Image (spheres, coloured by chain):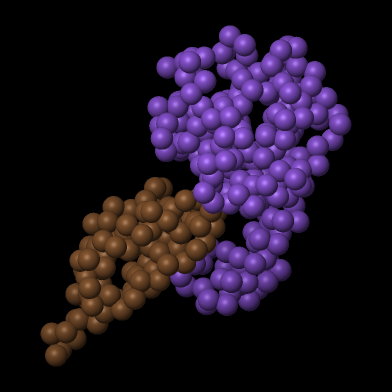
Chain colours: A brown, B purple
Amino acid sequence: MTQRPVKVTIAYCSECGYEPQTLALAGALMTEFGHDLASIELIPWYDGSFEVSVGGQLVHSMMREGGFPEHETIAQAVRSHLKAEEQPA
Amino acid sequence: MPVTPERFAQGMTYDEYKAQMTRNQERFAANERGLELAAADLAAFEGLREPLHVLVLAEDWCGDVIDNLPVLGRIAAESGTLDLRIFLRDQNLDLMDQYLNQGQFRSIPVFVFFDAQFNEVGRFIERPASVTERRARQRRDLFAQHPEFGSPDTPADQLPEEIRVAIMQETTRLRAATKPDDNREVVQALREIVERAKT
């Protein structure tokens, strides 16, 4: 079975100083998933946003959940998406 | 833990703060220059019987600090009645956690006004509620005027890049256009605090 790589997007408030949290999450995902990631898209956004989508599905929103996500929460979402997208080799 | 004169004195002066900024210096300076301070507003601060100490929590990456600290800085410089000391939020969490926004959030800037005996007179956190409401209204109106932007609830990553860019450009334009109104709201909020010190 092969896994179809997954895209992760992080929309972060660029005037809120969220760069360290954004880069830390991106780095953690890069380290764990390597080529299982199709891409990581970083979107400078506004109004206190920190939204993480995995495979087009919103898995964390600061507005909704409050605060930043645990890296493991996002990693688990990536793993789930990879498993769901498994294809015969 | 109340703020003591000794703790207050550990803060940077306004000029020291500006000198150590590593980003947004030009925007900060432009906001300082661009403030129109009405004579009646300045007089409200000049009329203080005794100077007030103002403890400030700030960071140079924060948009609300860049917008609102220059307003306080100009008022302090022109009135001569506000003694500012500025602390970097992330290095002074003992202070920050005494002035949480809604008891939860480490929002900045924080301006805490003290009398000569370091009794708190009032505080200003982040931005006036009226400015927050105006921005929300602008956002709703923007999406209503531009149906091609879709729903204001659409997550950023689901917007085409050209739409995201257009939204950011329009938002930036609208905020620049209403900056004088925002500044007036900030000045009014600070006036209301110092008026309490006069009673």
Q: Quadrant of the N terminus of chain B?
A: top left
Q: Is residue A24 left or right of residue B62?
A: left
Q: Is residue B58 left or right of residue A81?
A: right
Question: Which residue appears farthest toward the bottom when viewing the image?
Answer: A89
Residue A4 point in image, percent of width and height: 24, 82
Q: Looking at this view, is B98 or A60 the one in front?
A: B98
Q: Residue at x 26, y 65 (%)?
A: A29
Taking B195 as reference, is A41 above or below it? below
Kindly indicate the quadrant of the structure image that contains residue B12. top right
Kindly indicate the quadrant of the structure image that contains residue B116. top right
Q: Residue at x 13, y 85 (%)?
A: A1
> Is there any visible trace of residue B168 in the rendered image?
yes
Q: Residue at x 51, y 57 (%)?
A: A14
Residue B36 point in image, percent of width and height: 81, 42
Q: Residue at x 52, y 49 (%)?
A: B22
Q: Looking at this view, is B152 or B161 the one in front?
A: B161
Kindly indicate the quadrant of the structure image that contains residue B111. top right
Q: Is residue A76 left or right of residue B6?
A: left
Residue B19 point in image, percent of width and height: 57, 41
